[in-house]
Amino acid sequence: MQKEDCIFCKIARKEIPSKQVYEDEDVIAFKDINPAAPVHLLIIPKQHYDSLATMGETEIPLLGKMLALAPVLAKEAGATNGFRVVINTGHDSGQEVNHIHVHVLGGARPWKKL
Ligand code: 5GP
Ligand code: ZN
């Protein structure tokens, strides 16, 4: 199911343009509009889920697909020296877009080491 007024559902429906780097029947990946690193991609499911917190065992194949895509797309985008995967989840994480997305960040390491 998609959500009418969700910005990432609109990107998945191509109602809002994006710099797309990957698409299949389940997911789409595109460049973040406000990159926090030289390589900054977002991988999202076409189906709407508010966040990782609303996903469960049923979504294991979908979550696995998104995670497995991260190294492939990072490499294609030129992050050949490593990358970070981030899934902000819920208010306290700073999640701003309430459609689950996997950030793939690479090409430099400007962030605090966790
Ligand atoms: P969050 O803080 O929710 O984890 O991350 C949301 C991300 O989506 C931010 O990095 C922001 O720059 C990105 N973003 C928000 N709106 C758009 C948009 O319309 N297009 C693209 N490509 N990225 C977006
Ligand atoms: Zn959505």
Image: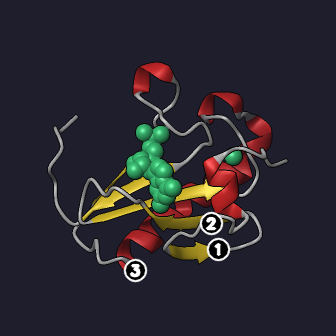
The furthest residue to the top = 92
Q: Are marks 2 and 1 in contact (CB under 8 Å)?
A: yes
- Residue 76's disc is 3
Left or right: residue 95 compared with residue 17? left
Q: Which mark is residue 28?
A: 2
Task: Please give left or right for residue 69 compared with residue 74 in the image.
Answer: right
Label located before the other in sequence (3 or 2): 2
Of residues 108 and 18, the one nearer the viewer is 18
Q: Which image quadrant for residue 66?
A: bottom right
Residue extending farthest to the right is 1
- Amino acid type at image mark 1: Glu
Which residue is label 1 attached to?
A: 23
**Mark 2–mark 1 distance (CA, rounded to whole Å):** 4 Å
Sequence order check, earlier mark of 2 and 1: 1
Secondary structure beneath label 1: strand
Instruction: Tell whether circle 1 marks a residue whose Cβ is less than 8 angstroms from ligand 1.
Output: no
Q: Give the Cα distance between marks 3 and 2.
A: 15 Å
Q: Secondary structure at mark 3?
A: helix
Residue shown at 36% from the left, 76% from the top:
77
* Quadrant position of the C terminus in the picture: top left
- Amino acid at the residue labelled 2: Ile
